[in-house]
Image (cartoon, rainbow, N blue to C red):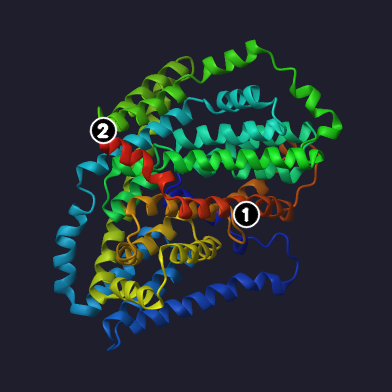
Amino acid sequence: MTSATETSATLDNTNPARSTESTGTVKEGRRPWIVAAVTLIVLGGSAVCVFLPLVPEAIGAMACVMMLALLFLRVPVAVAMLIPSLLGLYALRGMPLIESTFSKLVYNGVAEWTLSVVPMFVLMGLLLWRSGMTDSIYLAGRHWLNWLPGGLAVGTNVAGTGLAAVSGSSVGTAYALARMGIPEMLKAGYDRRMAIGAVIVAGLPGQLIPPSIMLVIYAGIAEVPIGPQLLAGIGPGLLVAVMFTLMIVGFAVVRPELVGKTKGAAVAQDQTTWKERLVSLVRIWPVPLLIVLIIAGMFSGVFTATEVGAAAALFSLIVALMWKRKNRPFAAVVESAVATVSSVGAIFFILIAAAALTSLLTLTGISTGMADAVESLGLGRVQFLLVMVVVYLILGMFMDPMAIMVLTIPILIPTLNSLDISLMWFGVFTVFMGELAVVTPPVGILAFIIHGMVKDPDVNMGHKISLKDVFVSVGWFLPMAIAVAVILILVPEIATFIPDLASAQK
């Protein structure tokens, strides 16, 4: 899953500020130290300002600045939220406020029955991932969609949707697809930028289609029902997959050289037999069955979100034991269980820290002040959300999805209520915009992961692929992602229709 721990660990290894191998001068090597020094100065200054005799709003603002500085220093998201929250609460009313807040907050922040779905979904994703279905899902997508213009890229995109939906990890999905998809597309004559772009955006719908850990975490922060929140991601997730598929087909029709048509790749793609297609479906039958089980169970009301999570985890356990029965099946289960405990601990720590930050922002009046400011500007729903698209794109250039979400949601909730924006809809919008953070330069995690992978001769197939090529490929697909966000703003029913229909049937 794309948890704070995963993205932070990945960021540590891929952030351009950490790498100087491409620079040979002392001047280039000093840049990271200059950035770190400035960040430390900002951190120290904001920490001092918190304890000055300032108005509560200023204390809250300094706490937010401190949190941003800690995030830039790559401090884990939960710690980066918790430290400013503790200092801000202490500055406001001393140790009694901290004791009264945390005596209940630590337990109440995570001891909710609805959050029991988190370990279930995490375990489900890890079990399916370790069962080795990655190759099978990719092959199925390729076999069934290779007749379309740009069929290999379309198959990669659809396979990424399925992989990300069951694994919950855009990073892991892109990593797996890059190993399989990029060499296949390059051998078929695809332009290197088209091959890379198709892989990078393939996992974006996965955090919207249930089960989605990011939507569950949002529901915990915003205190909205988890079941309807998960159902709200179905329509937008399918929309993202369809829009990117149409874009790839459009590229293939308008500029066929991008998909190797001039090199005879189209002839090779037509050689797939119906037997190969049917066999590929047999190998991945647990994935569509699992998705149907989750969606149908919640939509019909037969299962609650927690019950459907338990059923999905049990189903995934059976599948993992079947698929790995000849290759240490119980070892895979144990590894998945251990990783689940670690991931769930990190998620719950983030929820506790987010609750602490929310308490601070409420006491200082930052949240209500934000709502009053938006109201004074006279911004309507659409205008406000279009501004938020720009804000999220800018934040995504420097922060990971989890950090963006926990930073903005506590501040924006009063504003959303005043503008009559559905919190359930905004959860889908926030998760999607946050997922763009993993691809947008200059600190797009996926861009640097893919760039590191394409240095492998087995992946690049003899092509020289630069970091610029990776960023250009992101630039090709980013306008479509923005268009999807605008469509969601103008037609919010795409997200709310299925939850409304499910609630009407109960």
Residue at screen point 42% across, 55% down = 402
Residue found 35% across the figure and 84% down from its top: 49
Who is closer to the viewer here, 303 or 421?
421
The amino acid at mark 2 is Gln
Give residue 311's position: percent from left, percent from top. Answer: 30, 26
For residue 379, what is the image quadrant?
bottom left
Callout 1 crowding tier (Cα within 10 Å): few <14, some 14–19, many ≥20: few
- Cα distance between the residues tagged 2 and 1: 38 Å
- Residue 320 placement (x, y as % from top left): 42, 22
Nearer the observer: mark 2 or 1; the answer is 2
- Residue at 78% over, 31% down: 188
Residue placed furthest toward the bottom: 53
> Where is 348 relative to 166, above or below?
below
- In the picture of the structure, the residue carrying the numbered disc 2 is 505
Q: Residue furthest top?
A: 275
For the C terminus, the quadrant is top left
Say if 329 sits above or below 484 in the image: above
| Whether residue 405 is visible | yes
Q: Position of residue 236 (x, y in %)?
A: 47, 43
User: Is 495 on the left-hand or right-hand side of 22?
Assistant: left
Task: Give the x, y percent position of residue 406.
Answer: 37, 59
For label 1, the residue is 479
Up-down: is 188 above or below 439?
A: above
